[in-house]
Image: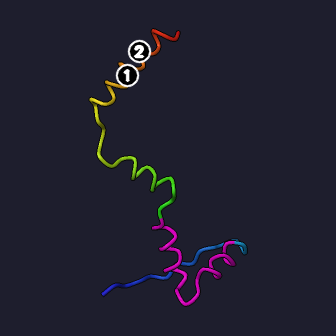
Amino acid sequence: MYVYMAKIISLSNEIYEKLSELKGEDSYSTVIKKLLLKKTNKEKILEFAGKGGINEKAIEEIKEGWKNWSKKHV
């Protein structure tokens, strides 16, 4: 069994109106919780970019290729 303690917070009128629009049948707590747990596009991109780990061999090949290119074109 969960015991919830009510807390009083202050919101600007603008934020209150936006929360009220999102609220619908949900409670304000539910709406705020959903917003807090929602991942941003940045977080999604970083999470995706991190899949598969770091390929050290590929990094070394890129470095070597860059050195060779630099010697020819600098």
- In the rendered structure, which amino acid carries the disc numbered 1? Lys
Q: Eyeballing the image, is 37 above or below 2?
A: above
Write down the region rendered in magenta: 15-38
Q: Which residue sits at x=53%, y=78%?
A: 31
What is the x, y in percent for residue 10? 64, 73
Residue 46 to residue 8: above or below: above
- Numbered disc 2: secondary structure: helix
Residue contact between numbered discs 2 and 1, judged by CB atoms under 8 Å = yes
Label 2 sits on residue: 67
Q: Is residue 23 above or below residue 58?
A: below
Q: Is residue 68 magenta?
A: no
What is the C-alpha distance between the residues marked 2 and 1?
6 Å
The residue lying toward the viewer, choosing from 36 and 54, is 54
Specify the amino acid type for callout 2.
Answer: Lys
- Disc 2 crowd, CA 10 A, few/some/many (<14, 14-19, 20+): few
- Name the residue rendered at 69%, 78% in the picture: 17
Q: Which mark is residue 63?
A: 1
**The N terminus - image quarter:** bottom left
For image coordinates 45% across by 9% down, the residue present is: 71
